[in-house]
Amino acid sequence: MSFPASFTWGAASSAYQIEGAWNQDGRGPSIWDTYCHAIPTEGGPAHTPAKPNVFQGHTGDVACDHYNRYKEDVGIMKSIGLKAYRFSIAWTRVMPEGAGSINAKGLDFYDRLVNELLSAGITPYATLFHWDYPEALFRKGGWLNRDSVKWFADYTQAVADRLGDRVKNWMTLNEPQVFLQFGHADAHNAPGLRLPTRELLLACHHALMSHGAGVQVLRARGKGPQSIGYAPVCVTRYPATDSAADQQAAIEAMGSITERNLWNNTWYADAIVRGHYPEDGLKIFGADAPKPQPGDMDLISQKIDFIGVNIYEGTPVRRGESGKPEVVERHHTHPTTAFRWPVEAKSLHWGPRYTYERYKLPVYITENGMSGIDWVSMDGKVHDPQRIDFTRRYLLELRNAIRAGSDIRGYFHWSILDNFEWSQGYKERFGLIHVDYATQKRTPKDSAYWYQKVIASNGAHLDANPLE
Ligand code: IFM
């Protein structure tokens, strides 16, 4: 058995990372505009150079200028044979102040994009929130404000009313672990906060309620059946050996909360799918855990149709002598990507498999890929054999998860284009398509041509050695 006949082969992006046009056609500012534009101040000891929030002060102001070049980009997607494209909608294009008046020109853009995709035979998968929270709403408390649930519902309604006749596949939130933990607790991402645990968990509670409210609105306003999910990080642990004990240890590790932070799976997924926060999390967070009001958990646990998993790497674990799962240290020469993330193909077997087996919902790989040191060679091409090898290894492991019985519906490579990698700016290149940021010239990398063959053969090409 290989990939199911209806398997969805796609690639992904997000609004702030590719669109640019940050103040075009009435778009309002998001927290990422503010974060990138912040003037560096000298904070440390004397003579410490001022440090911008983002690598070398990069911003998403122009990014890949996809807002103005979307036709060219969809044309390239078509030439690769993509079946589906996952993109996100910029909340502040639709509602510049985050709430209240709707900016028709902003919605027009997504309308044009969706039509372009459909006429290219590419199915749109839209994400409502990929981190670019409206600055105006942040100033009203952002996710800490219980009104954020209504703000999100109203924004969703504006989007659903405009696109819900043609977009049938939706994700509410992208990687809540990252925008909450990194953005609101570790100050690595916008808005750069260091909230105490109690407030962090409250922000998370409101984000989860917003997810639920978004699901309700999409069901009510979309035309015809909608397939709705969300796209969290899948914090992946995989068994260090094939032993049943290590397999069980990996499953346990993925399904438990052992630290007082939001870097886990179950705080989100148990609430969404099972309707309650997990016991071990409640215990560890103690008095800091949110106190749901009547109806909150029902709202959070609206029925969804799939779970997305964003997986780049994983950690090997074994059953320790204490009986608990124990991390197995990697050798210091273990292969890494340009970003120095470990290459861990087994994560694409165990992450989706664990998710399916625990929640019994169809799974999509909503992101997977790697950053590489890619440039245009003297022959005018971009040779990225490591991305091909990486993706092939990971997809072969994904196939093993399918063979083990997991209901996995699709794979979205991150990313379609090189783009703005948040606090790393343009330093990391994740694209199947190389972008020369000085000229905006697009060059499909070797991996794009290879992926084209994988798609055309529904995965059979994975069995061919790409170096032969
Ligand atoms: O670029 C990001 C994306 O926005 C969210 N998931 C991880 C990617 C690579 O870091």
Image (tube, rainbow, N blue to C red):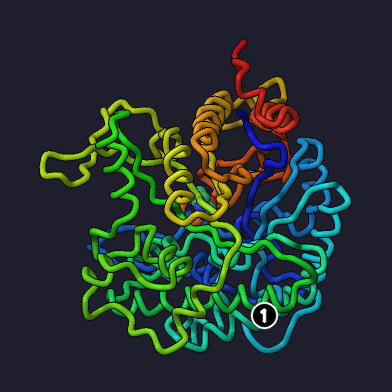
Element type where label 1 sits in the image? loop
Farthest residue toward the top? 468
User: In this image, 336 relative to 381: left or right?
Assistant: left
Instruction: Name the residue nearer the viewer: 372 or 343.
Output: 343
Place of residue 162 in the rendered image (x, y in percent of width and height, measured from the top left): 80, 74
Under mark 1, the amino acid is: Pro
User: Which sits in the foreground, 400 or 288?
Assistant: 400
Give the side of residue 180 with respect to residue 130, left or right.
left
Q: Residue at x 75, y 30 (%)?
A: 456
* Observer able to see residue 412: no
Residue 283, above or below 456: below
Task: Decide which of 313, 339 is in the foreground and name it.
Answer: 313
Q: Kindly identify the residue that appears in the image at 55 percent across and 62 percent down.
A: 230
143 displayed left or right of 93: left
Label 1 belongs to which residue? 96
Give the quarter of the image for residue 264. bottom left
Mark 1 Cα-neighbour bin, 10 Å: few <14, some 14–19, many ≥20? many
Q: Is residue 91 above or below residue 60?
A: below
Q: Quadrant of the N terminus?
A: top right
The quadrant holding residue 180 is bottom left
At 27% from the left and 32% from the top, the residue drawn is 330
**Place of residue 331 in the rendered image (x, y in percent of width and height, measured from the top left):** 26, 28
Task: Farthest residue to the right: give it.
Answer: 119
Q: Position of residue 370 (x, y in %)?
A: 51, 38
